[in-house]
Image (tube, rainbow, N blue to C red):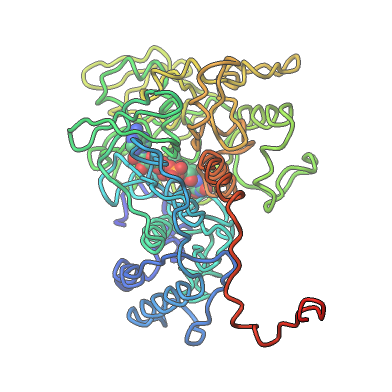
Amino acid sequence: MAEKSNRAPEFDQRTPIPESCQAPNSKIDRRGFFRGGAMLTISGLSATAGLAQTNGPRDSATEAEPADASEQLEAQTQRARRWAGRDPADWVRARTGVDHNVVIVGGGQSGTAIAYGLKRKGVGHVEVIDQAEPGQAGIWRTIARMHQLRTPKTLAGLEQDNPMLSFRAWYETLNGPDAFDSLDRIPRLAWADYLDWFQQVTGIAVRYRTRLLEIEPQGDLLRLHLESEGVRRVETTRKLVLANGYASAGGPNVPGFLRALPSDAWTHTASPIRFDALAGKVVGVVGAGSSAFDAAAVALESGAAEVHMFNRRAYVDYPRPPSQTSAPSDRGHSNVREMTYELPDTVRWRNFLLRDRRVASVPSDSIQRVMAFEGFRLHLESSLSDVALADGKVVARVAGDTRRFDHVIAGTGYRIDLATQPELAGIHESIALWGDRYRPETGEDSAAGSIHPYLGAGFQFLPREVTGADYLRNIHCFNLSASLSFGKPVGDIPSAADHPRLVSAIARDLYVESVDTAAHQRFINAPVVPPDPAPYQRAIQRPAREAA
Ligand SMILES: Cc1cc2nc3c(=O)[nH]c(=O)nc-3n(C[C@H](O)[C@H](O)[C@H](O)COP(=O)(O)OP(=O)(O)OC[C@H]3O[C@@H](n4cnc5c(N)ncnc54)[C@H](O)[C@@H]3O)c2cc1C
């Protein structure tokens, strides 16, 4: 990264991009490594397979030769394949005239891992679609702008109890255990490469450039209106999984004063931003969450002369040692994450209120990244008003001053509102919401919370009315709008703990539906035909009475 003239000198030494934040094996061809290991496709991996012993320990990433690391990953993958055995055969009884058993919308980390879980359960005819170009699904190479993930490196992830499929196994095999130990958190691009590897070794195919436009019920089936490379078509499915990401439960949250401006005057952090066009410019950033800080950092690193960040609150929170205020004892146990759905409604509701009311903390390195630049300005307890476009600039009043920006970036998060999600246009009114099922205690009302879907234990939508719209139980919602029902953000790495629950729910419904009662009846009533007794004939001793 070239040094910019507005970089604060005192930060030059303190905040270089840490080596641990660079993608792994940055001294060598990282993608070549990954490809070498990904040439194999594992037919299946058991939940109990352990991490294979490699050809001896390596001290650090720098000691690993590309070929060695690639060969080790390949050898380890082959071993995993041998130990795990084949994927179970598809046991789901076909239903005539239906194209798919399951369609998963989204080929990001959630969709891929859920597809793998279904494969290992023996659920066949699963189709994963994604509107993105190949290699562009998910957020990690597009709109995520931090150097490292925000979550701890040791979290369990997509591996579904199989450590050979974990980020750690992949990373250590390529880079050595010391390299993993010395990571602060997972480098973002390493995570993106790992996801590519995970998809390839688990053999999950994604139909790219294919967008879900509309869901139309037909009895208990779903007719999916798709657009694929400009061509529209309808395909039917018994089950649908919405693993379509943070922006697909109501879209990015854009303040009204920005929406009113021409679209080239502002960008939300959820979209690609033309940072090169911001060189030498004055940029306003609305919001002070992690994504706002990351966008501000890239703008400054791209040569923006000034970046002004506006925060309604009086402070920016960042990770600190636990406070004296004791949190409820059931919060924060990392290995019972899949149980948060079981909490009473009141507790799940209050967890939501907590997330809604408290300031989410920003990783310290994201703060340091912008603080490295003289041109960064943080305006606390400030918001923009009287916003207009004049002479090509965005002009706004802020705390009594008039300010002009060449471009404004909205780091204002995401909305949850199914009514505004295009593919749900025809069905959202039938979906049960928290406002339909839960009455908050006095003083705990939340209009935002009341429009979250009230989901069933398998992430399925529930019908608003007692009768009708039963097809909703076949739509499983694994995106941000599931967060209230599941007591945590859904889609992020910690929520992978709930993949098995979703997979089991889908498998259960198909299993029960697959039961062939007539075949059971034929089977139970069929005469029992004894086998030829030849293998034990000589030892048969008949009662004396019978022998005589
Ligand atoms: C900026 C940012 C940083 C984050 N950092 C972290 C972090 O550090 N740690 C963490 O645990 N979590 C983090 N998260 C949360 C979460 O991990 C990510 O959002 C992650 O990408 C979620 O994965 P996903 O597969 O559920 O959704 P996505 O990765 O968003 O994938 C959804 C896919 O669905 C496709 N899609 C959407 N709509 C349609 C449609 N109609 N038809 C077809 N395809 C469609 C999209 O093209 C996309 O590829 C972050 C989120 C954001 C936004």
Note whether residue 306 is visible: no
Which residue is the extreme one toward the front?
Answer: 548
| Image vertical order of residue 33 relative to residue 527, above or below | below
Q: As drawn, is 423 to the left or to the right of 507?
A: left
Q: Position of residue 66 (x, y in %)?
A: 34, 78
Q: How many marks?
A: 0
Q: Residue at x 62, y 21 (%)?
A: 434
Of the four image quadrants, the one with ligand 1 is top left
Q: Residue at x 31, y 66 (%)?
A: 31
Q: As drawn, is 298 to the left or to the right of 333?
A: left
Q: Residue at x 66, y 87 (%)?
A: 538
Query: Split into 4 quadrants, where in the image is the C terminus?
Result: bottom right
Q: Position of residue 443 (x, y in %)?
A: 73, 15
Q: Residue at x 37, y 71 (%)?
A: 25
Depth order, front residue of 381/55: 55
Q: Position of residue 382 (x, y in %)?
A: 50, 23
Query: Split into 4 quadrants, where in the image is the N terminus?
Result: bottom left
Q: As drawn, is 326 to the left or to the right of 98?
A: right
Quarter of the figure with residue 147: bottom left
